[in-house]
Amino acid sequence: MKTKLAVFDFDGTLIPDQSGQQLSLDLVHNKHLSKWTATKLILWGIRYKAHLPYKEKTARELIFKAFENENAEEVDKFIDKFYEENLEETVREPLLRIAEELRQDGMELVILSGAFTSTLGSFAKRHDFMHIVGTEMEVDSQGNYTGKVDGECVAGEEKIKRLYNYADEHFGKNNWEIEYALADHYTDRDLLDLANKVYAVDPDATLRRYAKKNGWEIIEFEKPKEK
């Protein structure tokens, strides 16, 4: 039998906020990032919200300027502490209950997200998720972060590509299938289309329409914004 996967998005799904944005705010507040870098992050966010051209790597690399040439293990400890103090309490308990039910049914739980793998690892070790596919940051031969993304960000078409590569390596080529998928944004529609069962979690307006068209279950945590 094929291995059945339950694939969870992270930002906006397992947690309500954007983990990278929360980390950047913390870094700015504690003066680990300059005001100029913070300004460039704001401008990137404006382009993203306005659907103007933007580079996925830019925001991640601006945030990781705070950790450039710093020991990766120590940075990961810093991020783990940040996660514990700022994000853990926001994790959506109903989704953890769904995850536990799926685990009991024999599913392999996978986090698939553009978030930093350090952040995803902090969540995963606390909630028994064994598989992480996220955005890796480059580490040099001395074990220090360079501030650059290692490869590509896990977003858009790259998200599906990375999932396939990971699943083929860990479960065997053509020996797995996506049984469940949970996500919040229309850009994840390609992932959701691959799943046998879909939960659209606090979906944006476009995903909400798409979910209703496809008969997918919608999970609401926040009241939808009036049109």
Image (cartoon, rainbow, N blue to C red):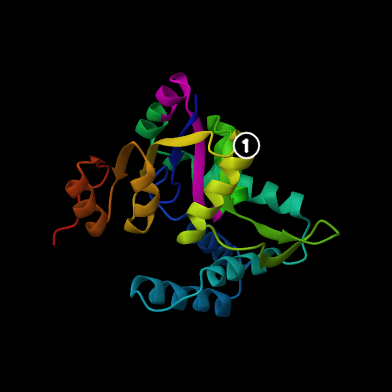
Residue 17 shown left or right of residue 199 in the figure: right
Q: Which SS class for mark 1?
A: helix
- Name the side, left or right, on which 75 lies relative to 21: right
Q: Residues within 10 Å of mark 1 (few under 14, many from 20)?
A: few
Residue 221 found in image quarter: top left
* Residue 208, position as x, y percentages in the image: 22, 52
Q: Give the residue displayed 81% in from the left and 56% down from the top.
A: 143
Quarter of the picture containing the C terminus is: bottom left
Q: Residue at x 42, y 31 (%)?
A: 96
Residue 96 lies left or right of residue 210; in this view the side is right
**Residue 50 within the segment the image draws in magenta:** no
Task: Decide which of 151, 148 is in the foreground and name it.
Answer: 151
The residue lying toward the viewer, choosing from 120 and 135, is 135
Question: Which residues fall within the magenta stretch?
Answer: 99-115
Q: Residue 186's x, y, as percent?
A: 32, 57
Whether the magenta-drawn stretch holds residue 113 is answered as: yes
Residue 147: give x, y in percent of width and height. 69, 67
Q: Is residue 194 left or right of residue 128?
A: left
Vertical order, 44 against 127 (above or below)? below
Count of numbered circles in the view: 1
Viewer-closest of 64 and 203: 203
Nearer-the-camera pick, 189 or 140? 189
Q: Position of residue 5 (x, y in %)?
A: 47, 34
- Residue reaching furthest left? 227
Residue for badge 1: 170
The amino acid type, in three-letter code, at marker 1 is: His
